[in-house]
Image: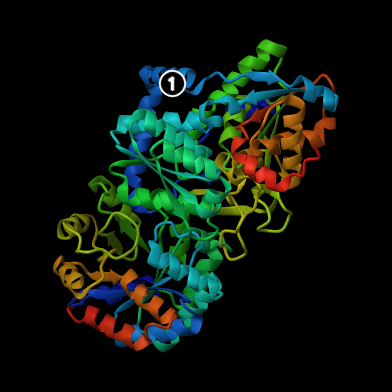
C-alpha cells in the first residue's frame, strides 16, 4: 500500500527543506528578517487569537468560504466526470492571492512593520497586497515587470487607487522573475521597517511554508464541501501551477488521501523549446533561484531561461519547492496546457457556465477538456478556479476572433 | 594556490589589501584581460572576479548592467574559469577569487566538476553570495577537497551569536558587508565598522575585509583606519568599466582612478 508513505508526510523540516528541495539561499543581510518572520509566524500559528483574527477577515473581508460549485452544464457537455469548481474567483479582489496577503499582513502588524513590499506578475497578488495594505494602513510598494504592466494595465490602476506605488521593473525579461529580484533588493535594504509579502509558495524558508499554510484553507474547505455534497472524496483535483500557491493550497489537505489523484497544470506556452513555455517539470532541472532549491528552467550554463505563457501568473522559471518533492514522490502528476488550449477553455467556461476564469485557471480547465475521458461518468473532479478573468479581457480580445 | 595562498597573502601584511571587483567578460573577454592589467598597474592586491548571472538579486544597478554586458559578450562559467587561467598566467602572484551565485557554481554542471576546474585554473577562493552557513556543508566539503577557501559574509544587521556560526564556515577570509542593501555607491563610509570588525575578530583569526559602498579615496582611508585586513571596491570600478564599454572612458582613466583609490593605503 502506498498510503503509509504519505501518512507521515510532514514537510518542510525545521530548516525549511522538502527533502532535497527548498531551504534558504540568500545573502546574509536577509537572515535577520527571515528569522524574525519565522519566529513571528511560529508564535502566531500557536496563538488561537491569531487564527481567530485571520478567520474573521477571511470570512468577513475576503468572503470565505468560497463555494464549491457543481458545474452541471460543463459536466453534461463533456458527458462526465462530475465537475466541481472551487470558486476562488469569488474571493475579494478576484483570486486566491488575498488569502496569503491577508495572513502575511497580520504577521507584518505583529512585527510592527510600517511598510509592505510585494512583487506581482498578473497583478492579482499586487492588488491583493495593495488591498490589505490599505485595510491595515501600511505604506505599500509593488514591483511589476514592464511587460506585465502593459499586459495588466487595469490592475496597475487598481493598485494606484488603493494607494500603492507600482514600480516598473525594466531588467531582463521585464516580467515576474525580475520583479521578485527587485522586491528582494528593496527588502535587503529596508527589512527593519518593511515586510516583503511574497506572493507564491516560493522563495527562501519560511515563505513556502507560510504561503502554503495560508492557502491550505482552499483545500480544507473543498474537502468539507465535497464530502457534504458527494459523501465521498473526489477522484481528482486539478489546479494550475505557476509558483504553485493555489495548487498547493488545494492539494495539501489531500496529500494523505492517496485515492485522490492530483494534477498540476503548468503553462505549455507556445511550444516545447526552452524559452517558449513555463513547464518546469518538462524542461527544467535542479537549481537555485531567488532563495530556493527547486526545478528551474535554465540553460546549460546555469543562466535562468526566459519563459513564455499567455498568463502572466504562470510565466515564471521556478516552481515552489514542495511541488518538486511531490513530483519526485509521484504524488502529484504534473502536466501542461498550452496558450491555445487555455484560451479555448477560457471561452468554453464563459459560454457554458457563465463564468469568466482567469487565463491561469483556464489552464486547469483546459487539462480536463482534453483528458476527461480518463474518468468515468460517475467520478468526481474538483478544479481550482483560482481567479477571475476580468484582468485578462483586453488580452483575450487580441487573441480571440468571435463570430457573433 | 588556493586557500594556503590566501593565507600567505594576508600574513605579515603591513597595510590593508586593496581588492578590486570586476565582472568577468565585461565588456568582453579580451577587454577583461586588459582591464586586469590596468588594475594591477593601479596597485590592486587581489582580484574579485564576478561570474555574470542572469538574476543577480544582491546586486545594484551598476553591477546588474555589468553582468548583462558580460552575458551579451558570450561569457559562461566555463569561460570565466579560462579567464582566471589567462590572468594567472600574466599575474601569477595576484590572488583571484570568484564572486558568484550558487546556481552557476553548483547547478550549471555540478559543484564537484566546478571546484576541480577552478582549482586547475589556479583560483584561490570562492565567495558564494547566496550560501549561508546552515546550507553550506556539502559545498564546503567539496571546496575544501580542492584546496579552495570559502569567503563568508557578515552583514551590519548580523546578530553577534550568529557571527561564530558564520566564521566557523569561512576558511578563506571574512567579508564584512558594511551596508544593508545591494552593491552600489554610497555617499559616506559606513558607521560603526571598527566596532563590528572587533566583534568579528573575537570569533576568528581569519582576515576580515570590508566592502559595499566604498567608492572614493576618502572612503578607502576611512576603511583602512577601521583596522581591516582588506578593502573591496566594486561598483565604483565597474562604473568606469561601463564608460569603457560605451566608449566614453578609457582603460587608462580606469587605471588612474584605481591609483587614486590605492594611494591612501
**x then y, percent, for residue A31:** 35, 46
**x then y, percent, for residue A36:** 33, 38
- Foreground: B29 or A132? A132
Quadrant assignment for the C terminus of chain A: top right
- In the image, taking residue B112 as reference, residue A285 lies left or right, namely right
Quadrant assignment for the N terminus of chain A: top right
Picture residue at 49% right of the left edge, 85% below the top:
B30
**x then y, percent, for residue B47:** 36, 76
Name the residue that disc number 1 marks.
Answer: A57
**x then y, percent, for residue A320:** 56, 42
Mark 1, Cα crowd under 10 Å, few <14 / some 14-19 / many 20+, is some
In the image, residue B16 sits, relative to residue A206, either above or below, namely below
Picture residue at 32% right of the left edge, 58% below the top:
B153
- Foreground: B159 or A171? A171
What is the image's colouring?
rainbow
For the view shown, which residue lies furthest in the front direction? A404
- In the image, taking residue B65 as reference, residue B172 lies left or right, namely left
| Chain of the residue that carries numbered disc 1 in the rendered image | A
Say which quarter of the image contains residue B199.
Answer: bottom left
- Foreground: A370 or A380? A370
Residue A145 visible in rendering? yes
- Foreground: A16 or B59? B59
Residue A41 visible in rendering? no
Amino acid at each position: 500500500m502506498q498510503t503509509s508513505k504519505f501518512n507521515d508526510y510532514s514537510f518542510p523540516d525545521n530548516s525549511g527543506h522538502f527533502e532535497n528541495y527548498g531551504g534558504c539561499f540568500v545573502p546574509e543581510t536577509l537572515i535577520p528578517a527571515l528569522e524574525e518572520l519565522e519566529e513571528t509566524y511560529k508564535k502566531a500559528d500557536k496563538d488561537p487569537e491569531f487564527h481567530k483574527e485571520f478567520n474573521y477577515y477571511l470570512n468577513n473581508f475576503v468572503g470565505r468560504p468560497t463555494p464549491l460549485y457543481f458545474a452541471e452544464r460543463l459536466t453534461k457537455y463533456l458527458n462526465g466526470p462530475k465537475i466541481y469548481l472551487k470558486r476562488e474567483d469569488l474571493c475579494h479582489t478576484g483570486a486566491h492571492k488575498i488569502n496569503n496577503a491577508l495572513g502575511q499582513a497580520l504577521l507584518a502588524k505583529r512585527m510592527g512593520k510600517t511598510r509592505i513590499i510585494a512583487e506581482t506578475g498578473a497583478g492579482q497578488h499586487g492588488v491583493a497586497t495593495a488591498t490589505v495594505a490599505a485595510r491595515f494602513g501600511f505604506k505599500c510598494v509593488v514591483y511589476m515587470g514592464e511587460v506585465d504592466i502593459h499586459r495588466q494595465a487595469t490592475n496597475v490602476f487598481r493598485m494606484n487607487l488603493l494607494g500603492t506605488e507600482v514600480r516598473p521593473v525594466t531588467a531582463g525579461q521585464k516580467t515576474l522573475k525580475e520583479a521578485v529580484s527587485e522586491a528582494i533588493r528593496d527588502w535587503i535594504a529596508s527589512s527593519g521597517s518593511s515586510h516583503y509579502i511574497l506572493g507564491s509558495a516560493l522563495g527562501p524558508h519560511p515563505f513556502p511554508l507560510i504561503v502554503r499554510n495560508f492557502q491550505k484553507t482552499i483545500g480544507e474547505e473543498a474537502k468539507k464541501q465535497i464530502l457534504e455534497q458527494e459523501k465521498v472524496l473526489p477522484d481528482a483535483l486539478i489546479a494550475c501551477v505557476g509558483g504553485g500557491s493555489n495548487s498547493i493550497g488545494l492539494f495539501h489537505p489531500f496529500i494523505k488521501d492517496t485515492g485522490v489523484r492530483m494534477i498540476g497544470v503548468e503553462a505549455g506556452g507556445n511550444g516545447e523549446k526552452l524559452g517558449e513555455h513555463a513547464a518546469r517539470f518538462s524542461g527544467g532541472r535542479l537549481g537555485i533561484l531567488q532563495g530556493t532549491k527547486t526545478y528551474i528552467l535554465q540553460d546549460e550554463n546555469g543562466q535562468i531561461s526566459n519563459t513564455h505563457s499567455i498568463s502572466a501568473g504562470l510565466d515564471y522559471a521556478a516552481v515552489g519547492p514542495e511541488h518538486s518533492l511531490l513530483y519526485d514522490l509521484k504524488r502529484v502528476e504534473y502536466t501542461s496546457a498550452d496558450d491555445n488550449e487555455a484560451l479555448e477553455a477560457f471561452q468554453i467556461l464563459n459560454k457554458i457556465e457563465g463564468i469568466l476564469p482567469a487565463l491561469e485557471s483556464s489552464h486547469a480547465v483546459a487539462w480536463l477538456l482534453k483528458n476527461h475521458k480518463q474518468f468515468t461518468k460517475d467520478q468526481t473532479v474538483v478544479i481550482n478556479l483560482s481567479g477571475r478573468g476580468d484582468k485578462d479581457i483586453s488580452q483575450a480580445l487580441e487573441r480571440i476572433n468571435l463570430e457573433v | 594556490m588556493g586557500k594556503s595562498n590566501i593565507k600567505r597573502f594576508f600574513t605579515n601584511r603591513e597595510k590593508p589589501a586593496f581588492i578590486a571587483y570586476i565582472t568577468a567578460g565585461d565588456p568582453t573577454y579580451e577587454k577583461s584581460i586588459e582591464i586586469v592589467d590596468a588594475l594591477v598597474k593601479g596597485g590592486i592586491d587581489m582580484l574579485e572576479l564576478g561570474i555574470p548571472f542572469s538574476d543577480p538579486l544582491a546586486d545594484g544597478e551598476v553591477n546588474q548592467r555589468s553582468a548583462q554586458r558580460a552575458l551579451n559578450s558570450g561569457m559562461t562559467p566555463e569561460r570565466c574559469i579560462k579567464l582566471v587561467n589567462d590572468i594567472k598566467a600574466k599575474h601569477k602572484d595576484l590572488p583571484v577569487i570568484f564572486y558568484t551565485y550558487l546556481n552557476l557554481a553548483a547547478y550549471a554542471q555540478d559543484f564537484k566538476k566546478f571546484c576541480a576546474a577552478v582549482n586547475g585554473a589556479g583560483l584561490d577562493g570562492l565567495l558564494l553570495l547566496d550560501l549561508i552557513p546552515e546550507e553550506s556543508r556539502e559545498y564546503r566539503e567539496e571546496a575544501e577537497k580542492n584546496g579552495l577557501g570559502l569567503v563568508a559574509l557578515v552583514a551590519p544587521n548580523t546578530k553577534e551569536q550568529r557571527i561564530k556560526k558564520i566564521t566557523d564556515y569561512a576558511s578563506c577570509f571574512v567579508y564584512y558587508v558594511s551596508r544593508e542593501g545591494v552593491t552600489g555607491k554610497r555617499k559616506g563610509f559606513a558607521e560603526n565598522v571598527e566596532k563590528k570588525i572587533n566583534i568579528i575578530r573575537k570569533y576568528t583569526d581569519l582576515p576580515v575585509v570590508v566592502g559595499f559602498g566604498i567608492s572614493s579615496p576618502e572612503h578607502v582611508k576611512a576603511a583602512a583606519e577601521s583596522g581591516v585586513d582588506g578593502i573591496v571596491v566594486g561598483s565604483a570600478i565597474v562604473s568606469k568599466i561601463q564608460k569603457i564599454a560605451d566608449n566614453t572612458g578609457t582603460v587608462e582613466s580606469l587605471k588612474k582612478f584605481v591609483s587614486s583609490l590605492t594611494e591612501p593605503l
